[in-house]
Amino acid sequence: MDRVRYVIVGLARSGTTATHAAIYGHPHICAMADELRVSPFFTSGVATFTVSGENQYERRIASDRIFDAITIYPPRAPDPEGKVLIAYNGTPDVPKAAEDVRANGLKVAIPNAEDARNLVDALQQYYPSVKIIHVRRSDWVAQFASLHRATKTGVWHTRDHASPATADESKMTLPLKPFEAYVDMAVEVERHLLSLRGSHAVHEVSYEAHVNGGDPRWVHPVFEFLGVDAMDPSWMRLTKTAPPLEDYVANVAELRALLAERAPDRG
């Protein structure tokens, strides 16, 4: 059986990490648990490691092998120091063997329009058979607030059984000019990512309806898309870090009005 290669894409704070964690614990899926930067892997490929620069033919024939090299690992327990930089290939109740891997992949959370363009260009030129899982969050106000809060506190996700971070005692007022720039950037990123529908098999995941919907079966269609058996993600150990938006942002209404002005389909 041929393995399916996949890439999870989406704006930062759109649910890419939760989607990634729900997928890579599957007994027939292997993945790089850490997030991959667009550059240099997707911008340079094998030329990252060579002296003479980029050779298009060499890059084309080497791309799949490099992709597999960073996403497929032999079964092993987590790092004993707790620094899990690669996927734990199995769980105590769902063991995983290397020969059973039927899909392998990685995730990229897009921070800017340039990265989105470079990623899409590379996928279309060198990875035409890769399946794309596009994670989208409808509420860009909440997405921007989550990014702002995570940057400020340094708390991006909680793992294992740690308690999620609590809201600040006082609400914060998010700056309008940076939010305007963020919306313009997000529109451009989405434009690039949506163009993949013309070149790749794409499965869309909604943050609100799926990732944050409360039903673990939301991931079943993703598994079917990747050609593996559907099952509940019993291995998930991520929890929300942010309280409801109105609990920690003072100017929600103002931000929503601005979003409606700059991106009417999102407002």
Image (cartoon, helix red, strand yellow):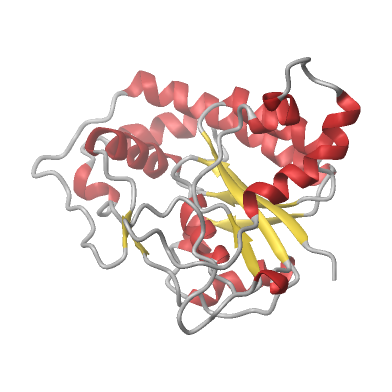
- Give the number of marks: 0
Q: Position of residue 265 (x, y in %)?
A: 57, 40
- Decide which of 122, 246 is in the foreground and name it: 122
- Can you see residue 134? no
Residue sitting farthest toward the left: 169
| 19 horizontally vs 246: left or right | right
Residue at 27 percent across and 45 percent down: it is 155
Residue sitting farthest toward the top: 52
| 99 horizontally vs 86: left or right | right
Residue at 62 percent across and 36 percent down: it is 190
The quadrant of the image that shows the N terminus is bottom right
Q: Position of residue 27 (x, y in %)?
A: 60, 75
Residue sitting farthest toward the bottom: 93
**Placement of 115 over or under 110, stated as above or below:** above
Residue at 64 percent across and 79 percent down: it is 230
- Decide which of 229, 75 is in the foreground and name it: 75
Q: Where is residue 140 in the image (x, y as percent from the top left)?
A: 45, 40
- Can you see residue 124? yes
Residue at 8 percent across and 44 percent down: it is 169
Q: In which quarter of the image is residue 204?
A: bottom right
Q: Position of residue 147 (x, y in %)?
A: 36, 38
**Placement of 55 over or under 71, stated as above or below:** above
Q: In which quarter of the image is residue 39?
A: top right
- Decide which of 67, 252 is in the foreground and name it: 67
